[in-house]
Image (tube, helix red, strand yellow):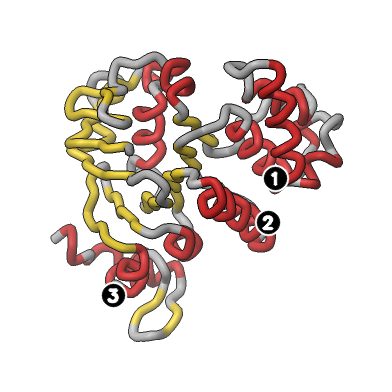
Amino acid sequence: MLTLTNLQVLYDRSIQAVRDVSLTVPKGKVVALLGSNGAGKSTILKAISGVLGQEDGEVIGGDIRFEGDSLVHAAPRAIIERGLLQVPEGRALFATLTVEENLIMGGYTRSPAETREGLERVYAMFPRVKERRKQISGYLSGGEQQMVAIGRALMGRPRLLMLDEPSLGLAPQIVETIFETVLALNRDTGLTVLLVEQNAQVALKAASYGYIIENGRIVLDGPADKLAANDDVQEFYLGFAAGERKSMRDVKHYKRRKRWLS
């Protein structure tokens, strides 16, 4: 459904943030893109969404194809209308608008009837969002804001939903609720999902396939269960070695000798 082939992204005409990245997101699947902060994950999503120009970034090589058509030179609106929608890192709500106004903004390419139907679907999925639909979004908790951000993307009736760090800064119980909702959508409606996460443990449980990116390059990929069982992934991303939990300080120290980068 979505294929990246040897993608290269440059910022400020000098900083190469993504280097020859190739990955595939099959229709109806949940695919995880894992990596530490600054590895290039969000840049890949921005390239797919066509918004790199807002940060003086550009695709300088490779291709991005959705159902066979290149998206490299497509306008953001055209990409949204094709059904690729992103939930950005940090939620990025319109803080001074109400919850319902934020949701309506997500359906701006849809008819009034479709917008009304979309609101009902979102409220059914997230009852807490319905309870707070008249409140100003900037006063919501982090978990509530994330629910609104996902709901806003769903208002556009995505065929492929891209989630950028959905667990960031949230309590485990809220993370579980959000992931259960996304997985239910995938299971019940066939929604395709590209999940970008630092939380490898959560992401690999949700995904069927995963890619690991370091310094702008894909360094490892495979079925999610095999990645979770991989010694290097357990040591460097899940904090385990020889079956024992390591401290974050130890994990950072061991990162210096990653076998796949040697």
Image quadrant in which the C terminus is located: bottom left
Name the element at disc 1: helix
State the mark number for residue 231: 3
Relative placement, left or right, of 20 versus 246 is left
Residues under labels 3 and 1: Cα distance?
33 Å
Give the residue at x 45% y 45%.
193
**Residue 224, image x, y percentages:** 36, 63
Specify few, some or many for label 3: CA neighbours under 10 Å numbering under 14, 14-19, or 20 or more.
some
State the mark number for residue 239: none
Name the element at disc 2: helix
Q: Amino acid at mark 1?
A: Gly
- The residue wearing badge 2 is 174
Give the residue at x 48% y 60%.
206
Q: Quadrant of residue 20?
A: top left
Answer above or below: position of 223 versus 211.
below
Mark 3 or mark 2, earlier in chain: 2
Q: Are marks 1 and 2 in contact (CB under 8 Å)?
A: yes
